[in-house]
Image (spheres, grey):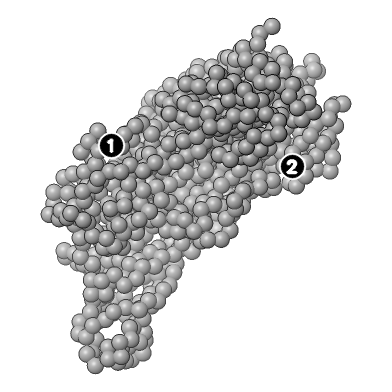
Amino acid sequence: MASPVCTLLLFFYCFVWLYILPFAEAAKSVTYDSRSLIIDGERRLLISASIHYPRSVPAMWPGLVKTAKDGGADAIETYVFWNGHEPSPGNYYFGGRYDLPKFVKIVQDAGMLLILRIGPFVAAEWNFGGIPVWLHYVPGTVFRTDNEPFKHYMQNFTTVIVNMMKKDKFFASQGGPIILAQVENEYGLYELAYGQGGRSYTQWAAKMALSQNTGVPWIMCQQWDSPDTVINTCNSFYCDDFNPIYPTMPKIWTENWPGWFKTFGGRDPHRPPEDVAYSVARFFQKGGSVHNYYMYHGGTNFGRTSGGPFITTSYDYDAPIDEYGLPRFPKWGHLKELHRAIKLCEHTLLNNKPTLVLLGSKQEADVYEDQSGTCAAFIANLDDTNENTVQFRNASYTLPAWSVSILPDCKNVVFNTAKVGSQTSTIEMVPEQLQLHWEIFVEKPGIWGEADFTSNGFVDHINTTKDTTDYLWHTTRLFVDQNGEFLTKGIKPILLVESEGHALHAFVNGILQASASGNGTVSSFSFKNPVSLKAGNNEIAILSMSMGLQNAGSFYEWVGAGLTSVKLEGLKKGIMDLSNTIWTYKIGLEGEHLSLYNADGAKNVVWKTLSEPPKNQPLTWYKAIVDAPPGDEPVALDMVHMGKGLAWLNGEQIGRYWPRKAPTDKCVKTCDYRGKFNPEKCYTGCGEPTQRWYHVPRSWFKPSGNVLVVFEEKGGDPTQIRFSRRKVSALCAHVSEDHPSFVTNNMQKVKSSLELKCPINTQISSFKFASYGTPAGSCQSYTVGDCHDPDSTSNVEKLCLNKNKCIVELTEENFKTELCPGKMKKLAVEATCS
């Protein structure tokens, strides 16, 4: 008989052959019925992973796709980002991060399928929901309703994308990877606000999509009145109770949110892997057939692409692959094991109807069985507090609270959603001590060059800038009598400002007086602050700033921003209202106009070289020449000691930075996975900057001579700017003897095992801890229990040392399993990679 390890490997290769390799062959037809998609005549149960191509860089795409496939995904899902592809009417761009055909080809070459969500409205916390800003200024246009200008441009763009995909034979009907296409996005949430125009638009969008003749089915998500020609799908944290409108359609989950987004000044939300796995298992238990993680890799909102407003530059999303492209353990590993367990049930699930078996007040099983005896079962404990033991088919099964056990043969539990056996990675941001010699260029507060216009009162910020920049200067003049009471008594007047959003810096006579902003919940704000005035003429200059445009909502394109009221309190005449005085305006920064962020533009000014750059100086451009950080780990820019602004490397837009701190309350030390999740359930990061590190892709670096440019709005300490390398410093894992174990293809059970895996190009170099017996504690704080195999360390070293990955089984060949009879034993290890 083969050893357990050989048996496990044999099963693995059988699994790869049976479930992964078929996708390497190009699909030729995609149809569906009430149970599933049918690809080339075969029912498919599909796991899909969202990866948005502009939120990473082309050099990362092959690795991201491979990591998704290694994690058990069959398909990649992406939106198409209209405003990135059509920056002006009829002018299209498909280069760099927006090279959609290249991204699709990489997916195809990996032997994976693709779900293309054309939209072209996407929401996605992306600037303006993905619709080009210029479209708002086409006369008579109203977004997302029965409006001729909008429909004209939407159909044009959809046709451009479809024809591009057809040209490269990317649709499954042409032998390509695209099996589904989506039109519109979550419109059902807002349709009612548009009345009959909204209902007509829904029908038009579906008809327009079908007229493209892609040869693959079209879907609409969160659309409860879609016609029977498209499949309506679910977006939520849980979709087990969802059913499509029409009984002829399969149950598809287009967005399962494994985490959540962040806003500057907000806390850091996390969704436990146990709950993500629970939601997925329940979906397939209740008849689901296509499931997509939104996001599987969130990535980065480079430049000014984030929406919201106030969405952070990081779009990490607590996803199974982190912002930098590294698998997030244990989430990635736990879901990989879940996918493998579900795939063992695929044929049985898709070819049989379930029988519901009630096992308790909050316990139930769905059993899929045919006349030959082939059987698969999902046993769920819906109790969000208590563990329960149930009887199922004359056997006893103990179910942790809020969990699902998967039995591909209706006998053996191969996976339980609440039992995490995957490794945990300890991630460190390792700073590089680079000697940065800064040159500076300081902008003058207020109007630079010729003013753009003047107005008696305020103008809307967004309508004025048309999102060509975050910045809009407002200036006005005020004469103060030298006999003013506040001057003689030394009492400062109070500046009172009201704004629709999003942020501002107030200067008086060239000196920064105050900064204020809204937040991710409420964009508008008001503030009052003492200011220093002098006798005679005074200039008040206010720099208004946008922080990404609204990305969703009814009539969201009409949401404005900018100043609405400016008053002074404490003058001789009481409160002086400056709102309707003459204001002079200038769009953007001088440095933006001169393109100081790229090599050619930097030549347009004289930079000052100082031995020590000034600290806490507003409106300052910093430039330094840097070498690429050593190694091949992902790189980030540490901006914790800076104020707020923008950063570039070699002309590439890193994005907005703002180490704004989160509130100090509502965070948890440990997250209880039990019970329904919401984004406020498991916060971390209280009292800390929402985003400290900013991803700088390795492919943007040259070996030397890189130009780093930073624009600081309000002041910081540039001497503390650092590059940091994102490094896996330790691996931890533990598994018990009763952990669900995989079975071979002939249903022979395999012993519990523990898997360790280092990042690419690194190996397991040492073990800080290893104990088989009754170890206690958690990662980085394990301790030996009263039962311990003294050979634990040497045994795991034999199996794992100097390897990129290894599997350690809890067998008598590896450990003294006869130790401590009657006690439940487990293995816990902590290793380092180098």
Tally of numbered discs: 2
Q: Is residue 810 above or below residue 641?
A: above
Which of the image's four quarters has the N terminus?
top right
Q: Is residue 361 above or below residue 691?
A: above
Verify CB contact (< 8 Å) between mark 2 and mark 1: no
What is the x, y in percent for residue 755? 58, 25
At a point 52% along the width and 40% down the height, the residue shown is 319
Give left or right: position of 634 versus 289: left
What is the x, y in percent for residue 600? 16, 45
Q: Which residue is mark 2?
A: 401
Instruction: Indicate which label's residue lies in the foreground, 2 or 1.
Output: 1
What is the x, y in percent for residue 651? 25, 44
Q: Secondary structure at mark 1?
A: loop
At a point 35% along the width and 51% down the height, the residue shown is 639
Q: Quadrant of residue 695?
A: top left
Give left or right: position of 470 versus 728: left
Q: Quadrant of residue 350?
A: top right
Residue 603: in sight, yes or no? yes
In this view, which residue lies farthest toward the top? 1
Task: Kindly report the distance in space between the C-alpha atoms of the residues bearing marks 2 and 1.
Answer: 49 Å
Query: Which of marks 1 and 2 precedes in the sequence?
Result: 2
Q: Which residue is mark 1?
A: 628
At a point 64% along the width and 18% down the height, the residue shown is 814
